[in-house]
Amino acid sequence: MPLPPHKGEVSPWYALTRGNGLHWFSKRVFAVLKMQICRWFRGNCVYIELPQSRSIQLDHLVHRVTCPLVLLSVMALSGCQSGQQADTDATRSSRLDTRLLQPQAHPPQWPVGWTPTTGQERPDDVPTISLAPNGMARTTVAPTIIDTRNFPVAIQSNDPWEGGTARPGTLLPAHKRDKTMAPGPQLDLPLGGLLAESRVDPAPVFPGISQTPWTPPDPTLAVGPDHVISTVNMAIAFYQKDGTLDFFANLDSTGDPGFFEELGAGTFTFDPKCFYDHYTDRFFVLALEYYSGSNESWITVAVSDDSDPNGLWYKYRTWSVFDIEGTDYWVDYPGLGFNEDTFYTTGNLFRLSGGGPGFRGAIYRLYPKAPMLVGDPVTWMDLNDTGSASVQCAQVYEGDADTPPYFISGDSNSSLKIQSIRMVGGQPELRTTSVAIPSHGGGPPNGSNPGGSIDSLDGRLMNAHWRDGQLYTGHAIESGNQSESRWYHFDTGDWPGSSGNPSPPVLVQSGAIDLPGTEHSFFPAIASNKHDDVGFVIGHCQGNILPNVRVTGRMASDPPGTMGTPEVVVESDTGADGRWGDYFDLTVDPVDDTTFWYIGEWASSGGWQTWIGSFVITEPACDGDTNGDNMVNVGDLLQVIAVWGTDCSIGSGCDEDIDGSGFVDVGDLLLVIANWGNTCDE
């Protein structure tokens, strides 16, 4: 899907794929290379800054790219330690970036005993969104265009908050629903466990956002070519991939300014989430707002204008008060996903005012991408399903224009509900099916640890990932009085189809992180990559084990349902009690479609702290070896350049089409860079 022009320029995508030369920014290429060199030579890597050019002409590419590559390779060999070390305590410590390990104290500044407000009258032009139960509505809004480079303070203070913290839910109206897991038939389906060996190779972690006045942090992350974005309650940060902080601000109006303040956001945003859309090379950020004094509920979203978050954002403040049979409802607990054409969010509907039921099921909101990529007004659709709750949206990889969205949620203690939306006569139709899973004991117990008891939540699904017909998800459940993380892999086949009733999805495999004794795991997040590796991140603790973050995964060749032994990547300094998390996050690097990035939480005497890291399962190998010499090096780069723009769908194809797109283009160049120096016969 071509990118539209932005910032008044010809789109880089157009120039790369349709122009006669190469309009390419070396910043992206060299940032990828820096990351890869430190992965090849684990340990004390020294990053080398290179001149950055926005445009490289074809006749200069060999000089500008190959010479620095050779120089970087030599310097990396002399300055980085190679080899993989055993996972000892010393090794785990070496993975930790020591920044922020000793939080700086600062005086409390947050107001106490206050009511969230926008500080202004309720807008008089908010739309009326009227829905019949299980109905649909359309609404339009125009964006506000904000340039983060114009913020008075690009990196605002994120000293760890040392005052009292509050749970955002305490400032919301009553939002209880029956979370009892519906009883299902007892199903003794195959359930895999853990292998005796690890499958992951973690890279060093770096500190993310430290404690704000809100608990839990609800951390999420988005990973682009050069940057990582993280959101928590109630803040956002942009990092370079080596952990360098580029931008930090509160999401609400307590910033200087807050990220959403200039849209009208007041002193209370909550449940933020983010992702990177690899189809359009854009970041997407969401936060909810609620203000009791003026009966306001908003789903506020922002789309970056390119793959660099430092710059223009198209921000949309979209109304989320729904009139259903004369009762108003507001939105809580968003899910967030995308496919090639649309951004999706879901949420739970709770009564705001009126005499209707206190809970009205789930809302499904569909934002078409095209207008949001250029900052035009957008018309979105809302669908209601009164029979669903806490629905997760899948992030769709390797889809095409016909790939629908996928949603998944709890159904019973032996089944999950899978949903999709297809268009029938120009109208969206929500399709629903139920798929059997191995039986479990329902919501998990709390996780005991030296600091008390961590709330493992209620067994809801934490994230969903779809790739080329395969749907993955996971959650924590009760098993033998433990909180146990489980994961599921479904084949969606042709379901839901464009017409008729194709066969429903089927369970391919499922597995459990079946830890010994009374160990607990919780807050799992899952994703897959182009090798069909599956990555997994979890929280973990025990009565005598401090809360920690662990990563694991599986290769496609592993026995069904199994994952490797989880490795500790971050371990807390102290224990924790009460709400924790409430979730972690995991995604795939869009540059190599191999590296997994995760975010998790860590506890210290200064409060909670988020940590960001990455790991690989299948090391990049022969991708990029276009000339067959079993090495990815300058010869392969020159070969890609020599046939740049070739249509490989004609004839017998071409070795230079590394990513299988049908053309020799920027994707193949990036794969050569990402796999630089690999020996393919190892």
Image: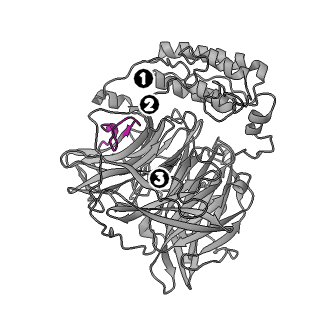
Q: Which mark is residue 464?
A: 3
Q: Is residue 342 above or below residue 204?
A: below
Q: Is residue 526 above or below residue 648?
A: below
- Say which of 376 and 647 sits in front: 647
Disc nearer the start of the sequence (3/2) = 3
Disc nearer the start of the sequence (3/1) = 1
Identify the element where label 1 is drawn: loop
Under mark 1, the amino acid is Gly
Residue 546: image quadrant is: top left
- Percent position of residue 547, x then y: 30, 46
Q: Give the overall secondary structure of the magenta segment.
A: loop
Under mark 2, the amino acid is Thr
What residue is disc 1 on?
A: 43
Around disc 1, counting alpha carbons within 10 Å, would you say few (fewer than 14), some (14 to 19), or many (20 or more)? many
- Percent position of residue 540, x then y: 30, 46
Q: Which mark is residue 618?
A: 2
- Say which of 97 and 540 sits in front: 540
Which region is colored magenta? 552-573
Q: Residue at x 29, y 66 (%)?
A: 185
- Say which of 171 and 368 sits in front: 368
Identify the element where label 3 is drawn: strand
- Compute the Cα span from label 3 to label 1: 33 Å
**In-image side of 480 versus 397 (left or right):** left
Of badges 1 and 2, the one in the foreground is 2
Identify the element where label 2 is drawn: loop
